[in-house]
Amino acid sequence: MRHPEHTLSTPPAAIHTPPRDMQRLLSALWVFAMFNYLYADVVGLMDSTMLAQYLRGQVDSLRITREFLLGAAVLMEIPIAMTLLSRILPYRANRWANIVAGAVKTAVVAATLMMGPTAGYYRFFAAIEIACTTLIVVLAFRWKPRPASEARARGPGAHAARLEEGWS
């Protein structure tokens, strides 16, 4: 069977319809963001100037204390937790968790860019991270539950599918 292709007569909304499984997409975006956060830190450790500052416990005017490291751990736990939570939370909680977590991570990365001069590699990763978490916020904000009629059209397993999507 041939698949219909998009033509000039295809409505723009049909082309830009979000994927049906928003939970998987959001989870994948959090994984993508997390790898960027981690690799930005790894590259920072390869920067001899930064590494020397880390070993001294002072990066520019920022002291690296146990409290600072706890805060960094909490901030890193956000994308780690969101990879799981995006898949298991019910629709409403899922949507709001992604909006809040994405906004927090976007703001934190943007704030780090304002703290003083940054290396080109850090600005590169930060731009990708900000774009990704902004996309998460936009997708979660626009996310609407599937209509009940579509769930009923799926057949006998529709109730289980509705539960997976966060429907009650």
Image: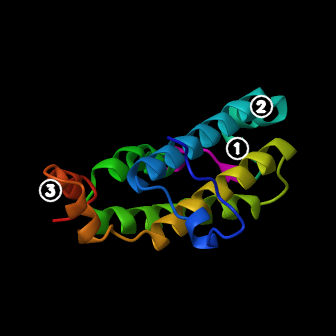
- As rendered, which of 52 and 111 lies closer to the eye? 111
Callout 1, which amino acid? Answer: Gln
Badges 3 and 1: C-beta atoms under 8 Å apart?
no
| Residue carrying label 2 | 52
Query: Mark 1 touching mark 2, by CB under 8 A?
Result: no
Place residue 112 in its image quadrant.
bottom right
Q: Amino acid at mark 2?
A: Ala
Q: Which residue occupies the foreground of this view, 30 or 25?
A: 25
The numbered mark, 3 or 1, whose residue comes first in the sequence reads 1
Q: Quadrant of residue 135?
A: bottom right
Q: Residue at x 18, y 55 (%)?
A: 158
Tag 2 secondary structure: helix
Which residue is the site of mark 3? 159
Please indicate whether residue 52 sits to the left or right of residue 82 in the image: right
Q: Tell me the distance, in whole angstroms, between the alpha carbons under discs 2 and 3.
A: 57 Å
For the image, the number of numbered tags is: 3
Three-letter amino acid code at the position of disc 3: His
> Whole-Å distance between the Cαs marked 3 and 1?
55 Å
* Residue 58 tag number: 1
| Labels 2, 3: front one | 3
In this rendering, position of residue 21 left or right of residue 157: right
Image quadrant holding the C terminus, namely: bottom left
Q: Residues within 10 Å of mark 3 (few under 14, many from 20)?
A: some
Q: Which residues are magenta?
A: 62-68
